[in-house]
Image (tube, grey):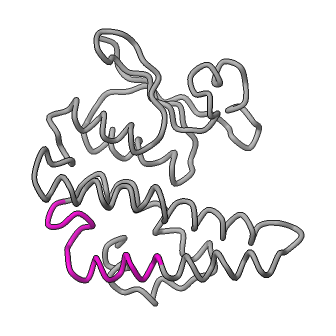
């Protein structure tokens, strides 16, 4: 069996599977896909992911080498193929890990990404910045409330939900937001 190959870049989404592979102690090959140069749009990468986004993991699945995209899918695959570490197999712990993983995918990443995008643009759109900044603050509030009630997003155990969210949560200062506003998030990202 060959080792997995991870195609990625140093973005919050791109760092998630690196964290997971390192936490699992899996030997893997890392291939950097420079998204600033558009390498994700090259034909060789397009063949791995029609959506032309990082990360992509090539791994043995069902006896053949498969390219798997979408960071949460990659984390779930890695957890399940490595003894379900960091991803509970049943009951409420599994449901909570899924819930908070998909909260990151549906809310945290898209909204934080939008506020970052609009703030970096040369031509500022005040309405867009305000809309995404307000929503990002609300989402930080949700995370803060959850982390006030539990040690980790899914409960008492560190899981893929934390791995999915941690790099986005650390972006507060880059987004022009003070992490001090959310003390439970600040503790968690430590």
- Residue drawn at x 32%, y 83% as measured from the top left: 145
**How far across and how far down the image is residue 151, in percent?**
20, 73
- Residue drawn at x 38%, y 27% as measured from the top left: 28
Magenta stretch holds residue 156:
yes
Q: Residue at the far bottom: name it.
A: 181
**Nearer to me, 43 or 170:** 43
Instruction: Write the start and end of the magenta stretch as one range.
Output: 139-157
Quadrant location of the C terminus?
A: bottom left
Q: How many marks?
A: 0
Q: Residue at the far right: name it.
A: 123
- Residue drawn at x 38%, y 56% as measured from the top left: 102
Magenta stretch holds residue 71:
no
Residue 1 to residue 121: above or below: above
**Nearer to me, 134 or 39:** 134
In this rendering, position of residue 68 left or right of residue 113 = left
Residue 20 to residue 41: above or below: below
Give the image quarter of residue 166: bottom left
In this rendering, position of residue 88 left or right of residue 128 = left
């Amino acid at each position: 069996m060959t080792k997995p190959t991870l195609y990625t870049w140093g973005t919050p989404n791109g760092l998630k599977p690196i964290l997971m592979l390192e936490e699992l102690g899996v030997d893997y090959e890392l291939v950097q896909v420079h998204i600033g140069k558009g390498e994700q749009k090259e034909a060789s990468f397009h063949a791995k992911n029609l959506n032309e986004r990082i990360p992509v993991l090539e791994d043995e699945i069902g006896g053949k080498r498969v390219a798997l995209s979408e960071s949460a899918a990659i984390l779930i695959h890695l957890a399940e193929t490595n003894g379900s570490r960091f991803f509970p197999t049943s009951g409420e712990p599994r449901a909570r890990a899924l819930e908070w993983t998909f909260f990151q995918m549906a809310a945290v990443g898209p909204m934080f990404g939008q506020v970052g995008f609009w703030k970096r643009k040369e031509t500022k759109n005040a309405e867009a910045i305000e809309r995404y900044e307000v929503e990002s603050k609300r989402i930080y509030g949700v995370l803060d409330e959850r982390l006030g009630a539990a040690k980790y997003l899914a409960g008492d155990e560190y899981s893929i939900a934390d791995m999915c969210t941690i790099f986005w949560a650390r972006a507060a200062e880059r987004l022009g937001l003070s992490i001090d506003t959310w003390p439970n998030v600040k503790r968690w990202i430590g």
